[in-house]
Image (spheres, rainbow, N blue to C red):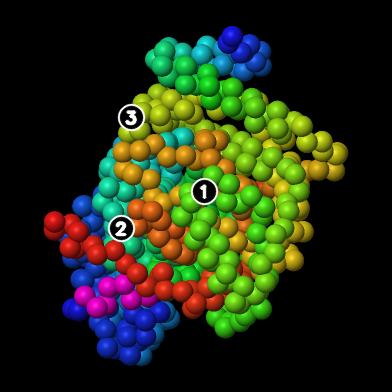
Amino acid sequence: MSSDLLFKPVRELAALVRARQLSPVALTELYLDRLERLGPKYNAVVTITRERALSQARRAEGEIAAGRYRGALHGIPYGAKDLLATAGTATTWGAAPYREQRFDFDATVIGKLEDAGAVLCAKLAMIELAGGMGYRQPIASFTGPCVNPWDTDAWTGGSSSGSGAAVAAGLVPFAIGSETWGSILSPAGYCGLAGLRPTYGRVSRHGAMALCWTLDKLGPLALTADDCGLVLEAIAGPDAADPTASERPYRYEVADRRGFRFGVIPDVTDGCEEAVIANFRSSLDELRKIGTVEEVALPDLPYEQITRTILQVEAVSAFEDLIESGRIAELTAPEDRFTPYAREAILAHDYLKAVRLRGVMAREIDRVISRYDALVAPGRINEAPRLGQEFRSAIRATAKDVMGAVGNGAGLPAVCVPNGVGARGLPTSLQFMGRAWEENRVLDAARAYQSLTDWHTRHPKVDERLSE
Amino acid sequence: MPETPNPEAVALFALVANRYGSRLTTEQLDEIRKMVEGQVEAARALRAVRLTNADEPLQGFTAYRGEP
């Protein structure tokens, strides 16, 4: 099996599979080999699902040979963040107290991907409890800090850390992650990938670890924005097991359009590294080739405090049993063992004020964003932090992230794509955030940007670096 | 001169210390004190925005009935 296949987008792999020029079984074996050989070096993998993968791949191969092609994900390997329940294997939530946890059913997303013919190869590493306990360093996972394939001294970002590392290192062509606030865009941005945070309710959360019931979203990390659209179509849709999963139909439609209207929030680069600011300005120059860019002011609201308060309260409630029992002391990151106790002091009145203000925020942002195809901003404020370094975070109020606060608080879709490199040669990123239920519009914009740039075609020299 | 502690933060920290102090170290309690002060600041920002009676939480509640 040729290594030329590595780093081919899903769309290209799918064309080869459909034409029977590429065997799903051989493709699966290629990725299983890489997951087994390289996964541990990145701390990217919790469980390799070899038997299940080969069974699914053989079935896909047989169906395709018989003329029963299911679509773009048929026979395509992938990995899932280890907060998605899978029957027959452990689902650890990245946390030592849950390392033996098992469910007897598949999460809805896993089931939908099975229906699409995709091949589950691995459960991928993650920050313990999806980062909801207030972690501030990359070690916050019982599987160790996730290593960035671009630089083995750098972190991947989190909390979908293994999803970022695995796609960036060519261990799987795409992966599923989750985002409560930043957990898809952070690893995608730091690892030079496309990451899509869908509208809240677009994808069923059934079988996914609950961190914050009103903030959690599941979405893909892949090599291109186009691939994210292909995956979203497979996982979106209503689900009787999750009342928040919307009945709104979703079909990924590829439109080769121009004439976009982009908005930029004033001071959106405050606190960003110099290279991030420079790359963002270059990105705006590119975007002006395909549309207009104008500054747009948001109403004066305490966006970060609204989303942070909701997140903090829902997270301690979701893990009340772990916290009250004292087993929280078994978590890996020292700060995760005590930070949640502070949140017990958030008053119910203030929480409800945040929830009411969220409604105001959602209406106000919709009024603003409806005039644009997307608001654009740097995907991250910096290059990937070093492995041994504490990082800044809006969730802990040590960094600004109005886009993240608004986007997650109001449940809006966003896609990030690579847009350059920083001072240390690590990827920087650009995000497009759109109106609720307008994933196709932000994907159109991101795809148009990627048609003008080649950052997404650059990949880390994975094997060579590790053999040094 | 040290800043005067915010009385609300002091009271809320006391609540946490009273409930969970026995399982926390002095250093952890000191960090929690700072976090509670940050939460009180965030609450002030929330309280500063005036809402009307019509400003309801966005999330809806629906009455549940099992089958049949």
Residue at 43% x, 25% y is A338
Q: Amino acid at mark 1?
A: Cys
Q: Amino acid at mark 3?
A: Glu
Give the CA separation, mark 1 to mark 3: 35 Å
Residue at 56% x, 55% y is A242
Which quadrant of the view contains residue B27?
A: top left
Indicate the position of residue A200 as horizontal and vertical percent values.
59, 56
For disc 2, the chain is A
Which residue occupies the extreme left position in the image? Answer: A467
* Circle 2 Cα neighbour tier, 10 Å, few/some/many (<14 / 14–19 / ≥20): many
**Position above or below: A78 against A253:** above
Between marks 1 and 3 in the image, the one whose residue lies nearer the viewer: 1
Which quadrant of the view contains residue B7?
A: top right
Give the CA separation, mark 2 to mark 3: 31 Å
Q: Are marks 1 and 3 on the same chain?
A: yes
**Position above or below: A289 against A338:** below
Q: Secondary structure at mark 3?
A: helix
Q: Are marks 1 and 3 in contact (CB under 8 Å)?
A: no
User: What residue span does the magenta drawing correspond to?
Assistant: A3-9
Task: Tell me the number on the disc at residue A330.
Answer: 3
Q: Are marks 1 and 2 in contact (CB under 8 Å)?
A: no
Disc 2 target residue = A150
Give the CA separation, mark 1 to mark 2: 20 Å
Disc 1 target residue = A272
Mark 1 vs 3, N-terminal side: 1
Q: Nearer the viewer, residue A436 or A290?
A: A290
Mark 1 vs 2, N-terminal side: 2
Task: Please check the rendered image and state whether residue A4 is part of the magenta-colored stretch, yes or no.
Answer: yes
Residue at 66% x, 67% y is A293
User: B51 left or right of B26?
Assistant: right
